[in-house]
Image (cartoon, rainbow, N blue to C red):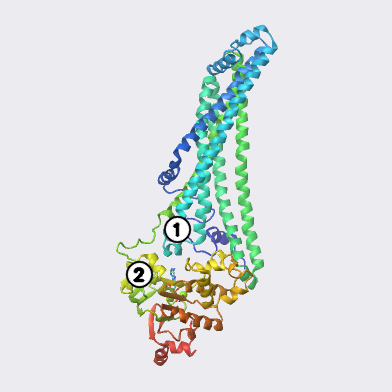
Amino acid sequence: MARSLERLRTQYAAKPGDMMKRGGPGGGPPGRGMTGKPKNARMTIRRLLGYVGKYWYKLVLVLLCMLLTTVTSLCGGYLMAPIVDHLALAVNPDTVITMSPFERIADGILNRITAGETVQNWIASGTIQAVSAYVAVALLVLAVIYLVGVVTTYLQARLMMSVSLKVIENIRNDLFEKMQTLPVRYYDSHPTGELMSRYTNDIDNIDVMINNSLVGLVSGLISLVGTFIFMVTTSWVLTLVTIAFIPVFLFGGMMIAKRSAKYYAAQQAALGAVNGYIEETVTGQKVIKVFNHESDCVEEFSLLNGDLKDKQFGAQFWGGIMWPVMGNVSQVTFAVTIGVGGILMCTGGFTPGALTVFAGYSRQFAMPINNMSQQATTILAALAGAERVFAVMDAEPEVPDLETAEATEIRGDVVVEHVTFGYVPEKTVLKDITLYAHPGQKIAFVGSTGAGKTTVTNLLNRFYDIEEGSITIDGKDIKEYPRDWLRKNIAMVLQDTHLFTGTVRENIRYGRLDATDEEVEAAAKLASAHSFIMRLEHGYDTMLEGDGANLSQGQRQLLNIARAAISNAPILVLDEATSSVDTRTERHIEHGMDRLMKNRTTFVIAHRLSTVRNANAIMVLEKGEIIERGTHDDLLEMKGRYYELYTGKKELD
Ligand SMILES: Nc1ncnc2c1ncn2[C@@H]1O[C@H](COP(=O)(O)OP(=O)(O)O)[C@@H](O)[C@H]1O
Ligand SMILES: [Mg+2]
């Protein structure tokens, strides 16, 4: 039965990745597509300034360019005044022209360029050529001014882009570097999809903010102030008329922006749900087919898809209506301004040129205000994103190595004493575990799924630190070794295989980067991987993609074993390393590994009891406790749990 839209939306909108849990404790950040509001904007801005401030010299240049751009645009507009006025004079020489201060300056400059003759003289001479010459010169000056404007606009955009790209490059680097220092525990509570969205959504938003919003805000402010000054000096009466319309702009703009922001957020959430659903359907396609859930899937998808369409409609409608509405309001302003200006012109004290210029200004005056209020939404979203990025950067890293930690040679004498451990405080997973392994010994763990076998190995290499009990290697507490040294000395085949994008050879060599090609092959032979590798199209140079999707599960395990086998570590951990391999191959590996294990301490976790028979000691784990221990023969004699498991009286459950 298909789920309801409500249910689907809550399940998938909150889902930042594939089949992942929700954000971790401490109120994990919202999932993909969500924007949210910053909790501590001031602090976040300060940190962002730390990144941006490094390029202050470029920012100063950007500011300079913005000023020039605004000035050229305003001055260019103003040149229209003397041009129009002189054309008016040419038409009717009796027109009374009272120039505003700026117009007088502009006229003065133009007159100077046209050989110092005043325009009145030219007009008096009555030659149309004279007027044409004036206009031609004015247009030339106009062209030069606008050219400067084009250059400064270009420079400003280019500089700002280089700053913002550099900033997000640095943020990405810092974030990635930080992630390498985070403990395994962090990844337990922060699913892949969620961390991915730090790099995609959040950092993108920061880029947009620095590149567009910040520039829009500052240049909007400059142009607002500049326009205002020019307007007041041209006509304060008309300035008042224009200002009277500002509340209309602000109110209308805000109303629309609010609604569009609401729909935009809903659209993003709906988009997240649709994407999450597609992702899950793609990864789970086989399971869907196995259980014939295709039609349910289509039904559920069309629900989510329809929802997305509705939200997109709202978002696009309200987003698209902004400019037409504002445009019409500014047309009204324009008309009123022309009307009042016309009256002023008739009563004198206002020139046709000044009115032309003013009408243009009044039109563009309100634009920055609107623009700025729109940027506010983007900026808030970007700050919220930046906050989440910084939260990852502030996460507690792995505890630093002890000052006294020393990379002394490790032989592999492992002693675990009275270790009690839980991933979370409320649930104890291992209870009072005590065991030892001498160099070269093979210790096996058997027990049901969830008994705590993997957990024991997680403690050996300090994926998790213990609080009760002690683990020593060669008589030294594992905390007294530098963490990377410890891990270098413990080769592991993890229960979950992972192969990287790269060739087969590179993947095996991952275990020891200085291994020669011969050593790689030897390790592959040891792991019984050589023959199947040779059957691959390009042998050892075959590219593996998508976690080795082109291999069988068993083949993936063999490569993981080869990778561990190539390492010279004195301690080896095999966590169900051969669970997907057939028994014959498993036996092959065992013979190979026996040679390898000779001088190594090996911990083996295996489901098939036949593979652990020759272990020096077998630990039977049940619910986090070692309930039986001894050699295969001891345990059989004991006639306890192991005996039951081995003789098949009881299955591993
Ligand atoms: N990262 C983790 N966070 C919280 N609990 C975990 C984690 N890994 C394992 N557990 C829990 O610890 C218990 C033991 O798991 P594990 O050691 O993987 O069992 P085994 O390897 O024997 O199958 C299980 O109950 C499991 O749910
Ligand atoms: Mg396990």
Residue 286 position in % (x across, y down) = 62, 70
Image vertical order of residue 246 relative to residue 433, above or below = above
Q: Which residue is mark 1?
A: 179
**Near-viewer residue (501 or 10):** 501
The part of the image, by quadrant, that contains residue 356 is top right
Is 297 left or right of 16, judged from the image as shown? right
Quadrant into which the N terminus falls: bottom right
For disc 2, the neighbor class at 10 Å (few under 14, some 14 to 19, many from 20) is: some
Residue 67 position in % (x across, y down) = 51, 30
* Label 2: element kind: loop
Residue 91 position in % (x across, y down) = 69, 13
Q: Which mark is residue 466?
A: 2
The part of the image, by quadrant, that contains residue 287 is bottom right
Q: Amino acid at mark 1?
A: Met
Q: How many marks?
A: 2
Asked if one can make out residue 494 in the rendered structure from this viewpoint, the answer is no
The residue depicted at 61 percent of the width and 47 percent of the height is 314
User: Pointer 1 and pointer 2: residues touching (CB < 8 Å)?
Assistant: no
Q: Which mark is residue 210?
A: none
The residue depicted at 52 percent of the width and 83 percent of the height is 587
Asked if one can make out residue 488 in the rendered structure from this viewpoint, the answer is yes
**Near-viewer residue (26 or 515):** 515
- CA gap between label 1 and label 2 equals 22 Å
Q: Amino acid at mark 2?
A: Ile
**Near-viewer residue (534 or 246):** 534
The residue depicted at 54 percent of the width and 73 percent of the height is 521
